[in-house]
Amino acid sequence: MGSIGPDHHDPQLATALSSNEAADMATLDCSKLKGSPSERSAALKQLDEALQSYGFIYLANHGVSQTLFDEAFAWINSYSERFFDLDSSTKNMIARPASESLDDHYGYAAYGVGHISQLVFGEEEVEKHHAASPDHKETLEVGNPHEPCGSGPNRWLPEDVFPGFRQFYEVFWDACNEVEKSLRQALCEILRIDINTLCRKQSLNFGHISFLHYPQMAVKSQDGKDLQRLNAHTDYGSLTLVFQDNVGGLEVHDGQLFRPVTPKTGTIVVNVGDMLEQQSNGRWKSALHQVVGPRKETMGEGLQTSKTVLDRYSIAYTGAVDPEVIIETLPGCEVPGRWKPSMADCDEEKPVTSYEWLQKRVAAEYHQT
């Protein structure tokens, strides 16, 4: 791994080249967290070390069944003729409004609507970045299905138009929420603080799930800077759970290069977001990552690479601290860690709430020109 400075989230690092050599990420067997004291201790150590280095880790035996995993992708994959294969007029029945407000965050965002950047907030800067580096994706964002989300209303297609999706989503949301809750409790144990500290700060399940479709791009070998599908950025929230298909393209910055987070069948990729990095006072790293076009060298096993073009599908569950809670240092993290939290660039003089931070990031992502 390269030498990573404290400003590992610096937007200038987003111009780094990509490598074909995969990130040397650990795989946590989550069953060990329920094993013997020695097994749990070793698993906690592995989790802590992974989040201190890459800020990314694979989860195996995580409790989300392969059946549910496969069903999640079947709802969005064009081969199944599901959500992203619907005609535009149908998808736009639940279109996200043309708004920079967090309270209008959920719904369908068509190709070219959202635009990810890293700590770029000024209106002129955002517009310049958008013109130079557009994202290549369409997205369906859905929040907590059981109670008010804190980011505005969920938008659902009528049951007669898209039957069964809401029922599936509730089951999938609950499964993801359980995985994240177990990880939060593990992190509290690592810090030797009350096991429910982080759960109390996320009592409202103020998060969302993003279903992402990256339209077709040509398969190629690496040749310098790859064409972006999703710009380099850190995640806004606490912990993100990423479900990948086998096309690949997700990459994490190691301090010098972006390295592939290779798809591994049945695993979930977990990464630290800005809020948790701030709460841990830089102990755990909210790493820059991006999605690039398909390269045959970095695809998952068993994928047919004879095709000249490939779509990519992924699903990301993002947990977040309750809206009115100030993002501040947790007990046990008073001594600064290795990383300068990226939220420090928001305003070092004034602590921000979860809602304020998310509003700032969403306003930049959905800036209206």
Image (cartoon, rainbow, N blue to C red):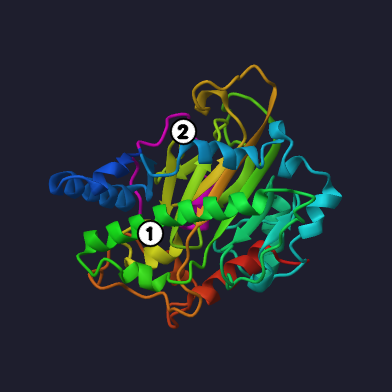
Of residue 113 and residue 210, the one placed in the foreground of this image is 210
**Among numbered discs 1 and 2, the one appearing first in the sequence:** 1
Q: Main secondary structure of the magenta part?
A: loop
How many marks the image carries: the answer is 2
Q: Could you say whether the residue bearing mark 2 is in a helix, strand or loop?
A: loop
In this rendering, the answer to whether 18 lies above or below 287 is: above
Asked whether 20 falls inside the magenta stretch, the response is: yes
Residue 268 occupies quadrant: top left
The local crowd at label 2, few if under 14, some if 14 to 19, many if 20 or more residues have their Cα within 10 Å, is many
Label 1 crowd bin: few (<14), some (14–19), many (20+), radius 10 Å: some
> Which range of residues does the magenta coloring cover?
1-24
**Residue 6 visible at all:** yes
Residue type highlighted by circle 2: Thr
Residue visible at 23% across and 63% down in the picture? 191
What SS does tag 1 mark? helix
The residue wearing badge 1 is 181
156 lies left or right of 244? right
- Residue 283, given in percent of the width and then of the height, sits at 29, 60
Query: Which label belongs to residue 262?
Result: 2
Camera-side mark, 1 or 2: 1
Query: In the image as oriented, which residue stretches furthest toward the bottom?
Result: 350
Question: Looking at the figure, which quarter contains the C terminus?
Answer: bottom right
The alpha-carbon separation of the residues under discs 1 and 2 comes to: 25 Å
In-front residue for pair 54/60: 60
| Residue in the image at 67% along x and 69% along y | 153
Q: In this view, does 270 lie to the left or right of 224?
A: left
> Does residue 260 appear in this view?
no
